Amino acid sequence: MNRPLLPLASAVALLSLSAVPTHAVAASMIQEEVVVTAQRREQDIRDVPISVSTLSGDDLSNILAAGEDIGALAVRIPSFYSESSNGRVGPRFYIRGLGNTDFDLAASQPVLVVVDEVVQENVILKSFPLFDLQRVEVLKGPQGSLFGRNTPAGIVKFDTVKPTFENDGYVSASYGELDTKILEGAFGGALVDDVLAGRFSLLYQDREDWIDNGFTGQSDALGGFEELAWRGQLLWTPADSLSVLTNLHGRNLDGTAQPFRANAVGPGGDFLNGNFDRDTVFFDEGANNPQKYRSLGGSVRVDWEQESGITLTSITAYETTDGTSFGDVDGGSGAGPGAFPPPIPFPSATQDSIDELDQLTQEFRWSGEGDAMSWQAGVFLFDSTLTITTDPFFVDPSTVTHRNQSWAVFGQVSYDLSDRLNLTAGARFTEDEKVLTADRSNFPVADVRVDDSDISWDLAALYRVSDELNLFARIARGFRAPTIQARDVAFFGAPTTAGSEIITSYEAGAKATVFDNRLRFNWTAFYYEIEDQQLSAIGGAGNLIQLVNARKGIGSGFELDAEWYLNENYFFTLGYSLNDTEIDDPNLRVAPCGSGICTVQDVVDASGNALVNGNAFPHAPDTIVYATANYNRVLGDGGEIFATADYARQGETQFFLYESAEFRSDGNFELGLRLGYRRTDGSWQASLFGRNITDEENMKGGIDFNNNTVYVNEPRVWGLNVRVGL
């Protein structure tokens, strides 16, 4: 465990601004409107009766400067967390403490990722690289009315930059430590005046292997990656009332799966011990953990505004991917008396492959807007086929096929009762069916089928106290469809299932822009209860993944987003969240660690199972702090110098359903920095960047069935970046 050695300078600086006279603020720094599409139409964030956090393009450039994947967004948004035991694929997202720790490639998550209004259901699809983005929004709390059944925790929503009829673009090149190379670019504009426009975007990232394998004696054996992602878009506008946007995108990844570290924590505490060396592992299996994935997808969006004023929107999308990850899961070498670092009772290496993933979605939506009312209604269809092969190497591989079909009808109405009061109501009926087929010649498994239907709904009110302050309140009911877990088939176990979970969420807050538009803040208080909460009991001595339904899960907390423009030179932000989660089920018990050297802190029954009633949800940080301090000064030559520092801190977090002294973290933090010069006309800029500049070694998660295995954050990377506008 690493605790901060430096004060939270950025946050203190922001809070101290209350002592600064507002007359010192320059008139040129009035904040611009923040536009979001949380309700599938463009709105000022202050007019949306939902807790929404956003990230700007500059924020993303800083966070992803060293080639980080989508998981780098964790702890950069209040109540939002992410981690992955699958490397650059298979991220697991958590909002307000609610997520799913299951590492299987077929795992269902209560956080949905939506890219250009297309659902990305599978964990591999959710890991598509981030580049050339217009906006990132995190919608917190159930979003079932407009976005679907698997959104009880919320949504991470990405909107890419779209083609326009104005020529524009950029090229950005970076080089950093660990021989990290990044090339990103985009260019777009008119192909046929006022009729056809296009945009092409590209991201290439490469890092050389930098982790030694001490068992084989290989230097720089793993840890690197090479990734190419691209996106092409065409916008056709044959008439003022009709537009057709096509999108084709792809990804090639060749890199390293997550490097696991055997017995690197404890015993007796959540600290990395002398067995941990960031630059070295001791793998005797796993072929140095190779990982390869290929993805291709596309969509067609049609918007047709009819003479009646009603707009018909159709979005047709298809995604496909395949790939494989191979890993030394025990994180060390040997077994028994000859294991290193000991103890490792038995060796474990596994290869998981997606043989086929095909996802087809179709949405039809009708919408209209008047002086006092806006509305939308639609139909959504979902069809996915996923085939996974798992090879544990001590027995024959197993292959399972998951088929998921779903359909829904939905609608929402927003009405201004007066100039000050707006009410919004929405509902969705969803039918969902999943079928599992398993193929294991020496262990036949019957087909498994689960299905259910339910209604999600929400009701919200927004009251405009003044031009500077809006208050809102919202109650929402969300639905997560039944799920099937077949991971244990590879180890001669039977599939497990979990029934539907229902969440009821309450939240209220304020959205304000005050002090002559210099200070913007949004705060929200929330409380939710989950009936029949779906949980994943992972690991233990049996090395199992089993789905269970807890009787109830409870969460509550507080969130704050703030931005302060001090003057033309200084700009500060602060994000903070407090989350309290609790499993409420006196009868729920799970198998604790099988390593034999972890310290279980729960009551253990006669069968050796831990009673987890009252425990926090796994991977649910109790606090998150993210602060930035920004400085810029215009020079006389038409340029300006700029500097940005950012601080992210993760509070107390436990890794499993049971509590132990080892499998937890508290006080993890990272610092980032960027210093540079840019032309005020946007023609070019050059900067020095650093990520995790104090090289913190933070535990992100663990594997408990064999030994005290953990995985950690990314290392420090300093680098240089040049960006040129086109």
Image (spheres, helix red, strand yellow):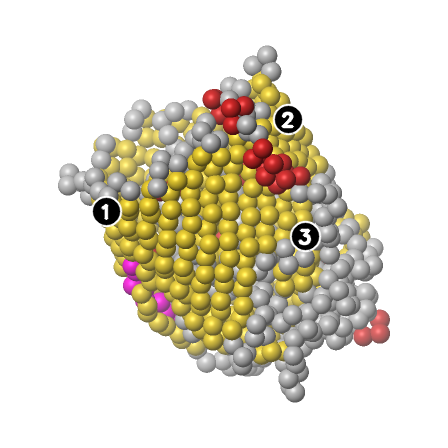
Report the mark closest to the observer, 3 or 2: 3
Q: Which residues are magenta?
A: 427-436
**Predominant SS of the magenta segment:** strand
Earlier sequence position, callout 1 versus callout 2: 1
Cα gap from disc 3 to disc 1, whole angstroms:
47 Å
Which quarter of the rendering shows the N terminus? bottom right
Q: Nearer the viewer, residue 366 or 340?
A: 366
Rendered image: mark on residue 417? 1
Q: Is residue 431 magenta?
A: yes
Say which element carries label 2. strand
Residue 615 percent location from the top left of the image: 59, 70
Rendered image: mark on residue 676? 2
Left or right position of 590 against 177:
left
Residue 323 percent location from the top left of the image: 55, 56
Q: Residue at x 54, y 64 (%)?
A: 581
Cα gap from disc 1 to disc 2, whole angstroms:
50 Å
Earlier sequence position, callout 3 versus callout 1: 1
Q: Residue at x 49, y 25 (%)?
A: 29
Query: Which residue, given by chain and number where applicable, does mark 3 sit on?
Result: 668
Which amino acid lies under the numbered mark 3 shown in the image of this protein? Answer: Asn
10 Å crowding of disc 1: few (<14), some (14-19), many (20+): few
Report the mark closest to the observer, 3 or 1: 1
- Mark 2 and mark 3 in contact (Cβ < 8 Å)? no
Say which element carries label 1. loop
Q: Residue at x 52, y 76 (%)?
A: 585
Query: Which residue sits furthest top?
Result: 636
Which amino acid lies under the numbered mark 1 shown in the image of this protein? Answer: Leu
Q: Is residue 409 magenta?
A: no
Number of dots carrying numbers: 3
Q: Residue at x 54, y 58 (%)?
A: 579
Q: Nearer the viewer, residue 533 or 173?
A: 533
Which amino acid lies under the numbered mark 2 shown in the image of this protein? Answer: Gly
